[in-house]
């Protein structure tokens, strides 16, 4: 999963978002570029509610890299 942040997002709000994501049991990879800043989520992102992350006011978009895996019997 990749979280794309809005331009000029407040550093304090970014730290809070990173801490919020870390409490979900996934690792984060923060990458700040000249045009776009992204947070890559590493691990089992099936337990991450993308709509809750998207509701954060500094988040521009959330994209899943792969669909959550559903175990079959």
Image: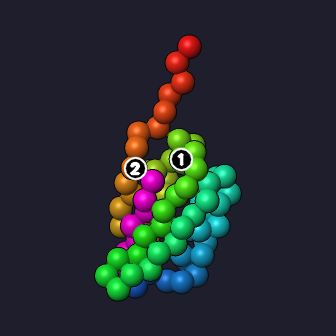
- The residue singled out by tag 1 in the image is 45
Span colored in magenta: 1-7
Of all residues shown, which one is farthest toward the left? 35
Label pair 2/1, CB-CB below 8 angstroms? yes
Residue at horizontal 55 percent and vertical 76 percent from the top: 13
Disc 2 packing (10 Å; few <14; some 14–19; many ≥20)? few
SS for callout 2: loop
Applied colour scheme: rainbow
Residue at horizontal 60 percent and vertical 76 percent from the top: 15
How far apart, in angstroms, are the residues tagged by discs 2 and 1?
9 Å
Does the magenta-highlighted stretch encompass residue 4? Answer: yes
Residue at horizontal 47 percent and vertical 75 percent from the top: 31
SS for callout 1: helix
Direction from residue 18 to residue 53 in the image, left or right: left
Viewer-side residue, 69 vs 21: 69
Locate the C terminus and report the quarter of the image it occupies.
top right
Direction from residue 43 to residue 35 in the image, left or right: left
Quarter-of-image position of residue 66: top left
- The residue singled out by tag 2 in the image is 64
Does the magenta-highlighted stretch encompass residue 30? Answer: no
Direction from residue 12 to residue 35 in the image, left or right: left
Q: Is residue 47 above or below residue 61?
A: above
Q: Position of residue 36 (x, y in %)?
A: 35, 77
Q: Is residue 56 visible?
A: no
Q: Is residue 24 visible?
A: yes
Q: Earlier in the sequence, mark 2 or mark 1?
A: 1
Q: Position of residue 7 (x, y in %)?
A: 36, 81
Q: Which of the labelled discs sits on residue 13, or is there none?
A: none
Q: Position of residue 62 (x, y in %)?
A: 39, 57
Quarter-of-image position of residue 28: bottom right
Q: Position of residue 17 (x, y in %)?
A: 56, 68
């Amino acid at each position: 999963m990749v979280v794309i942040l809005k331009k000029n997002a407040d550093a304090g709000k970014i730290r809070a978002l990173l801490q919020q994501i870390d409490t979900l049991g996934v690792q984060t990879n923060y990458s700040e570029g000249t045009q776009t800043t992204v947070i890559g989520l590493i691990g089992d992102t099936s337990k991450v509610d993308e709509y809750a992350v998207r509701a954060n006011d500094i988040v521009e978009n959330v994209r899943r890299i792969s669909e959550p895996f559903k175990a079959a019997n």
